[in-house]
Image (cartoon, rainbow, N blue to C red):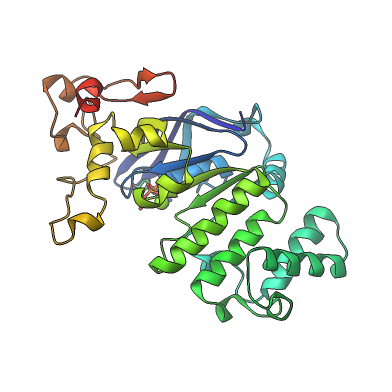
C-alpha cells in the first residue's frame, strides 16, 4: 500500500477549548488509485491531508495518536529533515487557491525551474527547459513565451494548471488535491479535473481528491471516504456508493446533488448543522440530524462495520440504509 492512515487523531487547542478535528481516521490509497474524500465543511478533510503532508499548524494543532504509513514507513516518526525530503519528492499537494500557493514575485518558469535545481541538481538551462516542457504538458498555450510571466498574469484555470505542474515536477508517488477546482467556474473546473485525472493515470500516482462535490467524483475516483465530524462514516468503491449508500449521511450528500432531470424542484439539503467539535454529541455524531436515528444511535458510537470486504459503514442501521 502506498499510503495508509491508521487511527489518526488531531486536535486544536484554542482559547475556547479543545477542538477534536480528526477522531480516529483511517484510509488508504494505492499506486495508481484515486481516493475521493467527501464531507461538509469542517469535517476534517483538510486537516487530515495536512497531517499526511506534514504541514499541520503545530501548535495550535497536535497529533493525538495514530500512524501515517507511507510505503510502510510511519511519517510521524521521521525527523523534520527526512520528512521534508518525502514532502518535496514523494508527495505533493495541490491547493484550492493557486494565487496564494504560488510565489507572486517569481515568474512561473523560475518557480518550476527551482524545483529541478534544488531537488535534482539540474543546471539553470536544463531546469528552464524542463519548466517549459511541464507547462506544455499541462497545456498552457505558448508555454515557451509564458514561462517568463508571473502568477497574476494567468487566468484562474491556467494558474491551477501551473500548480498541477509544480506538484508533478518531481513525479511524486502521491498527490493530494484539496478542492483543486472549487475556485474556478464550471467549464474550467471540468477541464482542470480532466487534466488531473489524465496525468494521474499516466504517471500512475496515488491521488487523494478532497471535494465537496459528489458530482465530479463518479468519473475520476476509485474509492470514496465520507467524513463527518472528524471520522470516516463510510468507505467504499465509488460504484457501490452510487448504487446504494450504506450510511444515511452519504445518502443525504447524494440526494443534495443537483440533477438535470429534476430542474425546478427544490434541492434536498441535510437538515441541521455539523456538531461543534469542542462538544461532539455522544453516540453517533450524525444522529441529531439523521432521519433514521434510533435511541441506540444517541448513546452508542457505531464502529466502522464491515459491509463487505471492500466496504465499511459507521451506522448501526447500515443494512436498512442499504436496502433503501
Ligand atoms: N489552525 C487551526 N486552528 C484551530 N482550528 C483549526 C485549525 N485548522 C483547522 N481547524 C479546525 O479543524 C476543523 C476541521 O477543519 P478542516 O479544514 O479539516 O475542514 P474541511 O473538512 O477541510 O472543511 P472545508 O470543506 O471547509 O475545507 C474545523 O473545525 C476547523 O475550524
Ligand atoms: Mg478543507
Between 234 and 99, the residue placed more toward the observer is 234
Counting labels gives 0
| Vertical relation: 88 (above or below) 186 | above
Q: Position of residue 66 (x, y in %)?
A: 50, 27
Q: Position of residue 194 (x, y in %)?
A: 52, 57
Using the rendered view, name the quadrant where residue 270 is placed. top left
Residue 232 can be seen in this image: no
Q: Is residue 204 left or right of residue 312?
A: right
Quadrant where the N terminus sits is: top right
Residue shown at 65% from the left, 60% from the top: 166
Residue shown at 62% from the left, 53% from the top: 199
Q: Position of residue 97 (x, y in %)?
A: 48, 64
Q: Is residue 7 left or right of residue 52?
A: left
Q: Is residue 220 left or right of residue 277?
A: right
Quadrant where the C terminus sits is: top left
Between 120 and 16, the residue placed more toward the observer is 120
Amino acid at each position: 500500500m502506498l499510503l495508509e492512515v491508521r487511527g489518526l487523531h488531531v486536535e486544536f487547542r484554542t482559547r475556547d477549548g479543545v477542538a477534536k478535528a480528526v477522531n480516529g481516521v483511517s484510509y488508504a490509497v494505492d499506486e495508481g488509485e484515486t481516493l475521493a474524500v467527501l464531507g461538509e465543511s469542517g469535517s476534517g478533510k483538510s486537516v487530515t491531508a495536512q497531517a499526511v503532508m506534514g504541514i499541520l499548524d503545530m501548535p495550535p494543532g497536535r497529533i493525538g495518536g495514530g500512524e501515517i504509513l507511507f510505503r510502510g514507513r510511519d511519517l510521524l516518526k521521521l525527523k523534520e529533515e527526512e520528512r521534508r525530503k518525502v514532502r518535496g519528492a514523494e508527495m505533493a499537494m495541490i491547493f484550492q487557491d493557486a494565487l496564494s500557493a504560488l510565489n507572486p514575485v517569481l515568474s512561473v518558469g523560475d518557480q518550476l525551474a527551482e524545483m529541478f535545481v534544488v531537488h535534482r541538481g539540474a543546471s539553470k538551462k536544463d531546469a528552464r527547459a524542463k519548466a517549459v516542457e511541464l507547462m506544455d504538458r499541462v497545456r498552457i498555450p505558448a508555454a515557451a513565451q509564458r514561462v517568463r510571466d508571473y502568477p497574476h498574469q494567468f487566468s484562474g484555470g491556467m494558474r491551477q494548471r501551473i500548480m498541477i505542474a509544480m506538484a508533478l515536477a518531481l513525479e511524486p508517488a502521491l498527490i493530494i488535491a484539496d478542492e483543486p477546482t472549487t475556485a474556478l467556474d464550471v467549464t474550467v473546473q471540468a477541464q482542470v479535473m480532466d487534466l488531473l485525472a489524465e496525468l494521474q493515470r499516466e504517471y500512475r500516482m496515488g491521488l487523494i481528491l478532497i471535494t465537496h462535490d459528489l458530482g465530479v467524483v463518479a468519473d475520476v475516483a476509485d474509492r470514496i471516504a465520507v467524513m463527518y465530524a472528524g471520522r470516516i462514516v463510510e468507505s467504499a468503491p465509488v460504484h457501490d456508493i452510487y448504487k446504494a449508500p450504506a450510511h444515511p449521511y452519504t445518502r443525504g450528500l447524494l440526494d443534495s446533488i443537483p440533477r438535470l432531470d429534476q430542474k425546478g424542484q427544490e434541492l434536498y439539503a441535510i437538515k441541521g448543522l455539523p456538531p461543534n467539535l469542542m462538544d461532539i454529541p455522544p453516540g453517533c455524531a450524525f444522529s441529531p440530524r439523521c432521519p433514521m436515528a434510533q435511541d441506540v444511535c444517541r448513546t452508542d458510537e457505531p464502529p466502522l462495520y464491515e459491509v463487505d470486504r471492500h466496504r465499511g459503514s459507521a451506522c448501526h442501521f447500515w443494512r436498512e440504509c442499504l436496502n433503501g
